[in-house]
Amino acid sequence: MIHAENLTKYYHDLCAVDEINFDIQKGEIVGLLGPNGAGKTTTLRMLTGFLRPTSGSIHVKDYNIDKHPLEIKKLIGYLPESAPLYYDMLVYDYLNYVADIRDLDGGRKKSRIHQLADLCGINEIMHQPIGECSKGYKQRVGLAHAMMNDPEILILDEPTAGLDPNQIAEIREIIRHIGEEKTIIISTHILSEAEAACNRVVIINQGKIAADGGIETLRQSASGEYFINISLKNADLKAAESEFTSIDGITGITEVAEKENGEILHLMLTCRSSGDLREEIYQKVKPTDWILLELHQETQSLEKIFQELTKES
């Protein structure tokens, strides 16, 4: 659906995007993550044709951004971080105006406006001035604007910035519903939003792609280090340390809490292994008289992965 090759953008001597490459398939919901100044918004603006790349190429379906900019723009709906709304217009009048720009006419225009009002949950504010609406409703109106021509691709730059938790949940649900039929790219600083709404994450840092893949894949490959928590009854700390440190891949053992009633031992095992060590741990416990009460592996949070990949050297 979207193919970017060696995509680069300079602002005078500043390299904002540095030869990045990626492909986005039809139906994917992709989260574009990165710290401020990483190049996220510049990348989105190049994909929409708003900015011209310094070098590199962008193809959307069978179209090239340099040769077919209008054809590509017809395929894309774009919601920038600050939705470009006319605050003195009624919501209905504004959407009617957008529909006219998009060459919708007659019954098709009216039907599309009502369809978007239902989808974006703005029926109750259709006859209010946009300037009197809450920020959450303004974002919904902006989303309806971006979707007026029923685009195949939806690009959303920080769609929930400045919203309260309830508004974020509502916008997230709308995006998830839209994603059943469209390809969506979301730029966001809210990592929980990416985890909840996206099936793939691209982390960009200093103009380069630092990671690209499914969230579970990133968790497994970010640093190779993970933790296993284990609780044992009737176990001795020194004996447990002796057994578990003999397992290749366990690099550290920490007692995370004092024994409960002098009986239950709680340990956190630091592991660095490409495989799952839980079976080997169980095999060490099995011949003893220890009672295994807990054995689970912690996965890295997206927040920790993000911090590792974007921290300054």
Image: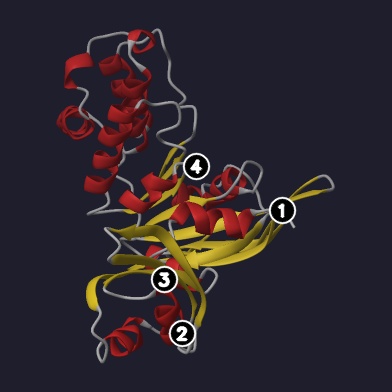
Picture disc at residue 217? 3
| Mark 2 burial class by Cα count in 10 Å: few <14, some 14-19, many 20+ | few
Picture disc at residue 131? none
Q: Which residue is drawn at 41% across and 82% down?
A: 239
Q: Residue at x 45, y 56 (%)?
A: 302
Residue 135, quarter of picture:
top left
The amino acid type found where label 3 is placed reads Thr
The amino acid type found where label 1 is placed reads Glu
Check the image and report above or below for 56 versus 179.
Answer: below
| Mark 3 burial class by Cα count in 10 Å: few <14, some 14-19, many 20+ | few
Side of 107 where 157 appears, left or right? right
| Gap between marks 1 and 2 measured at Cα | 38 Å
Q: What SS does tag 3 mark? A: helix
Tell me the quadrant of the picture where the C terminus can be found. bottom right
Farthest residue to the right: give it: 13
Q: Which of 263 and 223 is in front in this view?
A: 263
Precedes in sequence: disc 3 or disc 1 = 3
Q: What SS does tag 1 mark? A: loop
| Gap between marks 2 and 4 measured at Cα | 44 Å
Farthest residue to the front: give it: 262
Precedes in sequence: disc 2 or disc 4 = 4
* Residue identifier under label 1: 312
